Amino acid sequence: MKEIYTLADLKIWKKSAKHSIRLGVFGDPVAHSLSPQMQNAALQACKIDMQYARFQIGPNELKEALDLIAQNDFIGVNLTVPHKVAALDLIDDADDNAKRIGAVNTVQIENGKLRGFNTDGKGFARAIREEFSVDLRDMRVLLLGAGGAARAIALQCAREHCERLVIANRTFGKAKQLVDELRGFFSGPRVLGPVPRLQAVPWEEEAFRFQVANVDLVVNATPIGLTNGDASPVSARLLEPHLMIHDTVYASDRRTPFVRAALEAGARCASGLSMLLHQGALAFEIWFQREAPIDAMRHALGES
Ligand code: NDP
């Protein structure tokens, strides 16, 4: 098995030696993805004779790559940055949750048709419960980003009736649009004093400084930290010890730039490994209609 496959490999898939690879992750970049080690451990634990591989697929290659896996007897794939939103228009249908989020992270192939799901929101909620022993309910959340992962997290926070949700995004209009979509969830009689329960804010230091004092949990749902040399999305001097910090980005040593900034500020923090685990377990359950071997998956991520 190669470390990374490409569209060129998928084009000659049937002609090449019979593959046990029937699952994978499409991304750009994808080399960092720990999904293969986690999902292959799950397949092994369940004695399923298949393998899960990485596929470097660029944005312009996504449609062809999805068509090719449908033709080549794949069980399904996970989608990571930057494919989750674009995929929604390229698959045959999606469940209501993925449609509402507007993004797909799990594709299942059934009778040659591509079906879309999204396990990021539920995976995130389970990770927060596990890492911090708290529920999203009653939390005040500052969410950084408004892309595929952020949309899933925002909807989950809304569904679980978080006390406050603030969304900051580089492209402010996208944060504003997401807030508008979620308004119905926050229309109750709760009053929180001078700060609104649901709000889009610009991606600016001043906004971060003000919001940090009025939230409990800060979530990075941007890819900042994925590339070597990235700085923290919010600098350590703006963070405070009362905060819980969750970085959806992960590193095998757990020390992403955001996690390092949180530690410097004395805040509690978690990298994206636990979200990876839980969204992956939920994807496994969609593909195989059986409980995921969560301990084997956790162990494969070094999270035991
Ligand atoms: P998308 O491409 O859909 O969205 C990216 C978001 O990040 C957008 O809001 C974008 O803003 C913002 N962004 C990108 N670059 C910058 C930058 N340099 N400065 C400020 N904002 C930036 O990606 P996804 O939502 O699919 O993924 C985001 C991250 O979440 C990825 O790193 C992925 O690895 C991680 N993730 C982790 C999971 C886990 O299980 N641990 C699960 C899902 C995602 P704009 O709108 O302005 O472009």
Image (tube, rainbow, N blue to C red):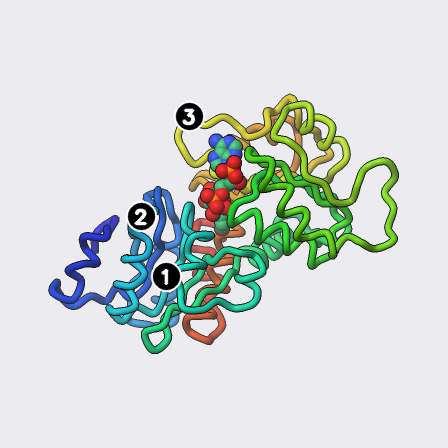
| Relative depth, front residue between 256 and 212 | 212
- Residue type (three-letter) at the residue carrying disc 3: Gly
| Image coords of residue 228 (percent x, y) | 39, 29
Mark pair 2, 3: CA separation: 27 Å
**Mark in front: 1 vs 3:** 1
* Residue at the disc numbered 3: 229
Give the residue at x 71% y 45%.
165
| Relative depth, front residue between 14 and 199 | 199
In the displayed structure, does residue 197 sit left or right of residue 227?
right
Give yes or no for contact between labels 2 and 3 (Cβ–Cβ under 8 Å).
no
| First of labels 1, 2 by sequence position | 2
**Mark in front: 1 vs 2:** 2
| Image coords of residue 289 (percent x, y) | 46, 76
Mark pair 1, 2: CA separation: 17 Å
> Disc 2 on helix, strand or loop?
helix
In the displayed structure, does residue 225 sit left or right of residue 59?
right
| Relative depth, front residue between 44 and 95 | 95
* Residue at the disc numbered 1: 77
- Residue type (three-letter) at the residue carrying disc 1: Val
- Residue type (three-letter) at the residue carrying disc 2: Asn
> Disc 1 on helix, strand or loop?
strand
Instruction: Tell me the number on the disc at residue 45.
Output: none
Give the residue at x 16% y 66%.
14
Residue 205 position by quadrant: top right
> Disc 3 on helix, strand or loop?
loop
Establish if 157 lies above or below 260.
below
| Relative depth, front residue between 20 and 295 | 20
Give yes or no for contact between labels 1 and 2 (Cβ–Cβ under 8 Å).
no
* Residue at the disc numbered 2: 60
For label 2, count other residues whose C-alpha is less than 10 Å away and answer few (under 14), some (14-19) or many (20+): few
Give yes or no for contact between labels 1 and 3 (Cβ–Cβ under 8 Å).
no
